[in-house]
Amino acid sequence: MLPRHVQIELENLLGSANVIFQSDKLKAYDCDAYVAEKAMPRAVVFPQSTEQVASIVKIFNREQIPFLPRGAGTGLSGGATPFAGEVVISLVKMDRLLHVDFENHRAIVQPGFVNLVLSRQIAHRGFYYAPDPSSQSVCTIGGNVAENSGGSHCLKYGVTSNHVVALTLVTPTGEIVTLGQVHGDVLGYDLLGVMVGSEGTLGIVTEITVKILKKPESVETVLAYFHTVADASDTVSDLIAHGVLPAAVEMMDQLMMQAVDKSVYHVGYPPEIAAVLLIEVDGLQAGVEDMAQRVLDICCRHNVHSVRRAVNEEERKLWWSSRKMAFPAVGRISPDYMVQDGVIPRTRLTEILARIADLSHEYGLRVANVFHAGDGNLHPLICYDGRIPEQLAKAMDLGRKILELCVEMGGSITGEHGVGIEKIEQMKVQFSSVDLQWQERLRRVFNPADLCNSGKLIPRPARCAEFRQIQTMVEKYAAAFQETV
Amino acid sequence: MLPRHVQIELENLLGSANVIFQSDKLKAYDCDAYVAEKAMPRAVVFPQSTEQVASIVKIFNREQIPFLPRGAGTGLSGGATPFAGEVVISLVKMDRLLHVDFENHRAIVQPGFVNLVLSRQIAHRGFYYAPDPSSQSVCTIGGNVAENSGGSHCLKYGVTSNHVVALTLVTPTGEIVTLGQVHGDVLGYDLLGVMVGSEGTLGIVTEITVKILKKPESVETVLAYFHTVADASDTVSDLIAHGVLPAAVEMMDQLMMQAVDKSVYHVGYPPEIAAVLLIEVDGLQAGVEDMAQRVLDICCRHNVHSVRRAVNEEERKLWWSSRKMAFPAVGRISPDYMVQDGVIPRTRLTEILARIADLSHEYGLRVANVFHAGDGNLHPLICYDGRIPEQLAKAMDLGRKILELCVEMGGSITGEHGVGIEKIEQMKVQFSSVDLQWQERLRRVFNPADLCNSGKLIPRPARCAEFRQIQTMVEKYAAAFQETV
C-alpha cells in the first residue's frame, strides 16, 4: 500500500480515474505474459503526458517508492512484473499518434500506441511500420522499445533498434531528456541505443520517433515442406549463401505443425513431413518474381517434399496466421507450455534441434519448435502439465538447459523476448563478471536510487555490503550532478 | 616528455622499435586529417596485442598520464590529436585479419586492419565489407568504429554500427571486456552501441567482429545531369517516395564538378549543368534491371539535362573515383579548403544549398558541395587561402554557421566525420545542457580518471568547481567498484 498522503497527491495530479489502489483491481497487474512468477503492485497509475510521468517519478523518488513502466503486458520474460512491489506506471492511456512526416519517413507516437495500429493509420499513403512481433495487434511500441522487439520480418528489416531514431525519456530521477536524432545518425554517445532494449530499467519512454517505410510493391510467399529438419535448415543456409535475402524465413517442426493445424488456422500440413519453411520475399515487382523463382529452385535442390507460392492474399494470410498463432496453438496439445527464446549461428540449426530432441526425451516433456530460421532465433515451446507439481520446475530446468546450449554453440540466451526476471541467472552464463559489472555501472548512472524496475535484466553484485557501498557512492555522485544542473 | 622510468618500462614491455620519445619523430602525430589545430604528443607507442594495450593503459593510470588511441590518422574532426599532450597509442601494428567465418558471415579483425583490405581478402569467396568511407583504401576499421564511419553506400547498407557485432575493449582503467554478440542481437545494455562512435573516449578497441556480406549479383550505375539543384533534389526525394532504395545517391554541385574535372579523374561534366547525381542500384539481376529503368524514368520526370548508365566497369570506376576524390580535388581550385559535415532532412536539400550560397557570398568564400544526397548528409568544402591571415578564421566561422543551419532545419552537426575537437562547441547547439550532462555521466563511468582522450566529443561542465566535485565522486565510485571485482 502507498502512504495516504501519496495516494492523495497522485489522485490530485492524475485524477481518481487514473489511479488504482484497491487490491482486487491490482490483481490484473501481478504479471505480464510470463506467468510462472507473480507479485502484486502497491498501486497502478495511468499518466497521460510526459510532464505527468516526470511529476510522479519525482514523487516516488522523494518517497523512495519503487516503480516500473508497463505497456500492454505482453512481455514474455517478466519485465513488467512488480517483484519489488513497485507502483506500476501503465502507459496505455498515452496512446496517441502525435505526428507523421510522410516525406521524410518519420512518425512520432506515444508509448502506449499499439504496434499494428501505426501500420493501419499510415497505410492509406502506402506506408507501414516494419517491426512485427507476433503480438503486434495488441503490444505497444513503448513495450517494443523496452524489449527491442523483433518479428518475422526482422531478417531483412532489422529489430526495433533499427527503426527508432529518437526518444523522449523521463529518467529514473524524473528529469526529461531527449535522445537520438530525428535525421542523421546518433552523435555523442549512443544513449538512444542503450535505452532501446533496457527493459524499463533506465527510465520511462514517453515519446518515440520511428522510421516508417514504403510498403513493398510486391510480395511473394512460399511454403515448403521437408522430410527432414536438416533439409529445411540447409535450404535456409543455401538461400543466404546465394545472396537471396528474404524478408522472412520461418520454420516449424512436426509437433508445432500438429498444434497449429488443430487451431482455426488449419493449413493441412502433411503428417509425414518433419519441417515446414514459410519464406517471404518482397521488393519491386521484377526483382521479386526472380527471387521467388530462386527460392523455389533452391528448395528443390534440398529434397523438398513439395513447395508452392501462395495463390492469393487470402492464402498468404492463412499461412501467416498459422505461424503467428503458433504460441497459443500449443495450448491445444498441452495443458500448459513455456516459450523459450535463444539464438544460435544459423549453420547449427540441425544440430541444436537434435540436442533439444535428446533433452526432450531425457526430461519426458514434449518440445514444439518454431523459429525465425534466417536469424537462427529459436522458440522452443516446452509442453508440461501444471497440475503435476514437479512438471513446472522440470520445464523451467529444461528451458535453462536449452539456453545454455545456445551459449555453448556461440549464440545467446535471448533473441527478442528479453531477459527480465526469467533469464537473469543465465546472464551469468552469457557474460563474465567483469562484463556484468560494466553493465551494472551503467545502470547505476541512470538509476542511482535503484527505484526503477530494480532486479531485472542485470544480475546484482553478489554481496550486500558491496552493493550498499556502491549505492552510497552513486547517491553522492548523483547529488553532485544534481547541483550542476 | 615521459618520466624516464616510464620510458624504460614501456621499452621493456613493447621493445624499443615500438616506442617513440624523440620530439622530431613525434611531429608526425601532432594532428590527424583535421589540420587546423595541432598539438605534440608526449610519446607514441605501438602495442601488438590486447594484453599489451591493457598493460600500458594500467601504467598510464598508475602514473596519471593521459593517452589516446589512433588508427590511420584520417579522421576529420581532430579526434586523434593530442591536445592534452597525450601518449598516442597507435594501433597500426595490430593489423591482422584474425578469423573469417564465411558460412555465418562474420570476420574478426584487429583495429589497425585497413578497411578496403578486408573486402579484398574475402573477395575470392564473393564477400565484401559494406561501410565504405572515401578514405577506405587507408583508414582502419578501428578508426571506423571510433567515428562510426559511413560512406557512399550507407544509404542502403547502414553505417559502421550496423556492421559491428562484437568488440574486445581495453577500458580506460585497463580492464579487458567483451561487448556485443557474435550471433543474435545485443542483450543487456547496448554498450557495444555506445562504444561505436565514442571517438576513442571510452577505451581502446583491440578486436572487432564485423558482418561480411555477399557481393550483390548485379550493379547498375547511373549518372544524371541537371540544370538546377532543385531538380536534382526532387529526383532524390521522388526515388525514395517510389520505393526505390538505391545503394548510393551522391550529388555534386557546379564548383565541385569543376574541381574534380581538373583532377586525373576527368569525367567531362557539361559546364552548363548545376548538379550531378551518381545513383547506384544493386541486388539480384532481374530486380536491378527494373530498378535502373525506374531511376532513368524518374530522372526524366524532373527535367534532367541528360542521363545514362555506365557502359562498363571501367566507366563506373571513373565515375566513382571522380566522386571519391572530390575532397582532394578541391586543392586544384583553392590553396586551402575545409570540409564540413552536416545532416538535414532530405526534403530540405534545395533550401540549405540556397542558404549556403547566401553565406558564401556574405563571407566572400567559395563553397563547393558534395553530398550523400539520399541521407541528407552534406559535405560543403569551404575554399580559403591560409596565407591571408583572417581567412582561416572566416572559413571556420562559416563552417560553424552552416552546422547551426543544419540544426535549425531539424538535422545534425555531423553525419559521419565525428565531433572530435572541431565541433565540440556546436554540441551545445545540438543538445540541451541536461542532455549533455547525461552524456558526461556516461563518460565518467567508463573513464573515471579522465585520462582517455579527454576533451573530445562532449563539452565539459562549465565551472571548474563542479567539475572537480564530480571527479571526486566518480573516483570514489570507481574505487568502490574495483573492490567488488
Image (cartoon, coloured by chain):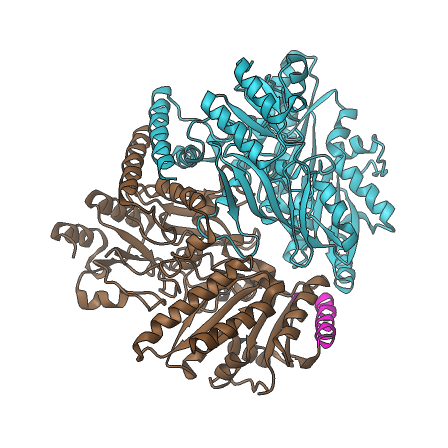
Chain colours: A cyan, B brown
Quadrant of the image occupied by residue B335: bottom left
Magenta segment includes B224: no
Does the stretch in magenta take in B294? yes
Determine whether B238 is above or below A229 in the image.
below
- Asked if residue A45 is positioned above or below residue B210 in the image, the reply reads above
Q: Quadrant of residue B295?
A: bottom right
Residue A433 on image: x %, y %: 40, 32
Closer-to-camera residue (A309/B219): B219
Question: Quarter holding the N terminus of chain B?
Answer: bottom left
Task: Answer yes or no: is residue A455 visible.
Answer: no
Report the front residue among A405 and B8.
Answer: B8
Residue at x 26% of width, y 68% of height: B28
Left or right relative to A394: residue A248: right
Q: Is residue B364 shown to the viewer in this render?
A: yes
Image label count: 0
Location of the C terminus of chain B by quadrant is top left
From this view, report whether residue B307 is shown above or below residue A117.
Answer: below
Residue at x 70% of width, y 38% of height: A114
Q: Given the current orientation, which residue lies at the most extreme front position? A: A12
> Which secondary structure class fits the magenta region best?
helix
Q: Which residue corresponds to the image point at 25% horizontal and 44% vertical from the top-left?
A: B58
Q: Position of residue A304 (x, y in %)?
A: 77, 48
Q: Could you say where residue B331 lies in the image, as x and y percent from the top left? A: 41, 80
Could you say where residue B6 lies in the image, as x and y percent from the top left? 16, 50
Magenta segment = B282-302
Position of B195 compared to A301: left or right? Answer: left
Q: Nearer the viewer, residue A26 or B309?
A: A26
